[in-house]
Image (cartoon, coloured by chain):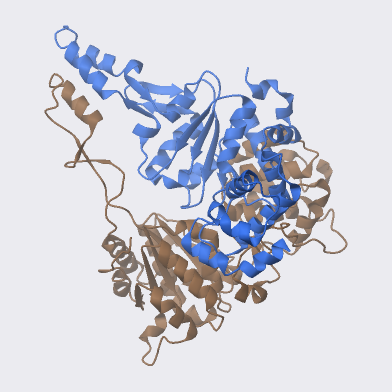
């Protein structure tokens, strides 16, 4: 039995919020409702939003909550079925062909042998549907793949089955919990969207960000956490090439804690710019806004 | 909440009627029987007595993109609660994300911020840093309902823009020619080919079975050509109305001939119209553009709208993107925002083309504020009205990436 069936907390939105909080993930109502529906409907969830707002983290946390395996497929341009679904073990097949050359087996028999599961290399998607317990399948940054791969995913996301020409159609033993993330570097097809629940995840509010920082770093001074969140919120208002996400806030908070800083001022900010600003143009822009930042510390 | 409060007698009827309403909006919600069924299942999974959860659940199932997500709350409250509970006075209408990007979240640089705030709240357009829906508190759902009463979706203009039929065939040919002229080098992807630098192992092995395991007939792979994507941004303001038909026709032709095309129009607001320019099987079934609201026929706000494009749809501008801006550049606004937006577009795109119909005028000198700012970032500055002129837009155009 999976955690989703056993844990009564997972049968309500508030319960999910509470469980996620126990795992240091602060989920607002839209996210908690989305996860509730992922568990109840077993439909894939497409999460879109700017980089660094916790889209990937939600899949990791869900796997922890459900006490199941997280299988991750990191997408990139040129990703194809051989890397995402399966590949045949060619060297092993070649060896087998050589070894059975004089065995007297027919061509059909030999072909059936080398195209059996023993010669199949499972990639993340196949791995996900052949698990004995439903895993969490994270298809990260789906917008980086091309249209052909997206079209290929349709069968998997609708039917939870894949077709391998040599073996036939393999159906999922248990439907995985699927989470797809996208940074909107291209528009995904309507066909893919229709197969998913859709959630737009934005940067957190100041209060939520303070809460996230305090949950992840329980020992942090509250005033410091608030200042970090305020500075990061201000930076997100600037026209930066790469606005700092929640991940950067957490890294920065961790850096300040490890440097034993109890408060923030301009000199500390300048020493630790590199944790939150990661672009040369952005750095110049932020330096021109020092006066406004100084006001935040006052 | 009880069913008697809703427009129809049963939950299913309400959902079907609501879906029908959503399908007929400018955002064209893609809702069929499967989505209705999923909605019913979703409602079983949440507390029906909790309006926030109900709305969130339906939103997750019925929305497919950010544009739809943005207007869903308005439509939900209009449909389910329009006559039932109207608050006495407007309050909290534009409650900003505390500490987050300001109420508008659009992040127009300081010099431009003050005049850009308006009755609608730019945040509503961005998705980036816009106000959070007031859904974390159960008591606060009157605010979006109130917003719905004044929503642009409620009073969307009935104006329809038609794509002209004249010369459409020639325009389609021009679009094909233009797309084919773009050369972006090779992709990282491997694809089966007659000749190539790498073996296609699976094919080779299959062929080898017929020759006793010896790969006598190898199969090859190569890197296919990178396919360009196009972003067409059309100034639909009053001063461009004379030329807009032809430019829109070109945008439609481009969309018909290439899969990777995004089309935006702007006047005082920016609107993405790609979904409205759907591919059609026959040219006689040309799409009509409706509900363009403030994106058509008004004043011009080039800088802010291009900035909005960068902020909201910046991900669509990539190394394989050819960005085409069609505008006369008649904008008297401050140029800082335009400069910033064009710099970002220039940095991210493969090429930036600016179509200015005024270039055909004898005495035109592109030294007006706006064009003067734009010129350093433009890879090709030209005018196009005839199909053959559109066909040459990318002729020998050097791609920067």
Residue found 47% across the figure and 53% down from its top: A185
Relative to residue B218, is residue B138 depicted above or below? below
Residue A4 position by quadrant: top right
**Residue at the bottom extreme?**
B363
**Can residue B153 be spotted in the picture?**
yes
- What is the display colour for chain A? blue
What is the quadrant of the N terminus of chain B in the image?
Answer: top right
Question: Which chain gets the brown colouring?
Answer: B
Residue found 84% across the figure and 53% down from its top: B84
**Residue at the top extreme?**
A104
| Residue B79 image point, x, y percent | 73, 52
Residue found 40% across the figure and 23% down from its top: A169
- Please give left or right for residue B69 compared with residue B227 in the image: right
Relative to residue B122, is residue A3 depicted above or below? above
| Figure disc tally | 0
Residue B275 vs residue A162, the one in the foreground: A162
**Residue at the right extreme?**
B88
Relative to residue B203, is residue A194 depicted above or below? below
| Residue A280 image point, x, y percent | 47, 61
- Please give left or right for residue A99 compared with residue B34 in the image: left
Residue A68 vs residue B380, the one in the foreground: A68
Residue found 58% across the figure and 51% down from its top: A245
What is the quadrant of the C terminus of chain B in the image?
Answer: bottom left
| Residue A210 image point, x, y percent | 71, 48
| Residue B309 image point, x, y percent | 52, 64
Residue A100 position by quadrant: top left
- Please give left or right for residue A68 compared with residue B88 in the image: left
Residue A245 vs residue B329, the one in the foreground: A245
**Can residue B159 be spotted in the picture?**
no
């Amino acid at each position: 039995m999976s955690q989703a069936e056993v844990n009564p907390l997972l049968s309500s939105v508030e319960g999910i919020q509470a469980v996620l909080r126990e795992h240091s993930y602060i989920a607002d109502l839209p996210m908690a409702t989305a996860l509730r529906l992922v568990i109840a409907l077993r439909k894939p969830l497409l999460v879109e939003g700017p980089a660094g707002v916790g889209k990937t983290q939600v899949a990791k946390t869900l796997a922890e909550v459900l006490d199941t395996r997280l299988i991750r497929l990191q997408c990139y341009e040129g990703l194809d079925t051989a890397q995402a679904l399966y590949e045949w073990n060619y060297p092993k097949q070649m060896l087998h062909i050589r070894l059975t050359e004089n065995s007297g087996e027919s061509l059909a028999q030999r072909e059936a042998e080398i195209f059996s599961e023993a010669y199949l290399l499972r990639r993340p998607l196949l791995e996900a549907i052949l698990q004995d317990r439903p895993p969490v399948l994270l298809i990260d940054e789906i917008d980086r793949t091309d249209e052909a791969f997206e079209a290929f995913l349709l069968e998997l996301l609708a039917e939870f089955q894949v077709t391998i020409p040599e073996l036939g159609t393999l159906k999922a033993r248990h439907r995985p919990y699927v989470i797809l993330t996208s940074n909107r570097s291209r528009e995904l097809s309507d066909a893919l969207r229709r197969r998913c629940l859709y959630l737009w995840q934005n940067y957190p509010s100041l209060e939520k960000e303070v809460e996230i920082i305090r949950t992840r770093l329980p020992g942090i001074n509250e005033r410091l956490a608030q200042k970090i969140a305020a500075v990061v919120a201000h930076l997100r208002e600037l026209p930066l090439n790469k606005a700092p996400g929640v991940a950067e806030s957490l890294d920065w908070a961790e850096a300040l804690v490890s440097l034993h800083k109890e408060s923030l001022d301009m000199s500390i900010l300048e020493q630790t710019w590199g944790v939150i600003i990661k672009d040369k143009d952005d750095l110049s822009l932020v330096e021109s806004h020092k006066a406004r930042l100084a006001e935040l510390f006052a | 909440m009880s069913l008697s409060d809703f427009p129809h007698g049963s939950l299913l009827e309400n959902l079907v009627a609501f879906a029908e309403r959503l399908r007929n909006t400018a955002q064209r919600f893609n809702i069929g029987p499967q989505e209705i069924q999923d909605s019913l299942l979703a409602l079983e999974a949440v507390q029906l007595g909790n309006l926030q959860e109900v709305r969130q659940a339906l939103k997750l199932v019925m929305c497919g993109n950010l544009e739809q997500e943005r207007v869903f709350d308005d439509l939900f409250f209009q449909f389910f609660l329009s006559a039932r509970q109207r608050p006495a006075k407007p309050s909290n209408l534009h409650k900003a994300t505390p500490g987050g990007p300001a109420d508008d979240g659009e992040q127009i640089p300081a010099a431009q911020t003050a005049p850009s705030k308006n009755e609608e709240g730019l945040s509503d357009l961005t998705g980036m840093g816009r106000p959070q829906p007031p859904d974390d508190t159960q008591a606060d759902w009157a605010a979006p309902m109130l917003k719905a009463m004044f929503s642009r979706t409620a009073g969307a203009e009935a104006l329809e823009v038609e794509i002209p039929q004249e010369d459409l065939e020639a325009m389609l040919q021009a679009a094909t020619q233009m797309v084919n002229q773009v050369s972006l080098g090779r992709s990282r992807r491997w694809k089966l080919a007659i000749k190539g630098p790498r073996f296609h192992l699976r094919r080779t092995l299959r062929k080898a079975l017929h020759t006793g395991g010896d790969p006598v007939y190898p199969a090859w792979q190569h890197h296919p050509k990178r396919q360009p994507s196009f972003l067409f941004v059309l100034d639909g303001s009053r001063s461009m109305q004379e030329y807009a038909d032809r430019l829109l026709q070109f945008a439609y032709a481009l969309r018909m001939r290439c899969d990777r095309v995004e089309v935006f129009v702007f006047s005082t607001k920016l609107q993405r119209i790609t979904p409205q320019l759907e591919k059609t099987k026959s040219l006689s079934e040309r799409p009509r553009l409706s509900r363009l609201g403030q994106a058509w026929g008004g004043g011009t706000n080039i800088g802010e709208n291009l900035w909005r494009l960068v902020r909201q749809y910046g991900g669509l501008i990539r190394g394989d993107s050819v960005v085409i801006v069609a505008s006369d550049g008649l904008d008297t606004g401050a140029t800082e925002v335009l400069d910033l937006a064009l710099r970002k577009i220039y940095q991210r795109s493969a090429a930036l083309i600016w179509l200015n119909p005024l270039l055909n005028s004898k005495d035109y000198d592109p030294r007006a504020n706006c064009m003067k700012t734009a010129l350093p970032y433009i890879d090709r500055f030209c005018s196009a009205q005839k199909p053959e002129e559109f066909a040459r837009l990318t002729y020998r155009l050097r791609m920067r990436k």
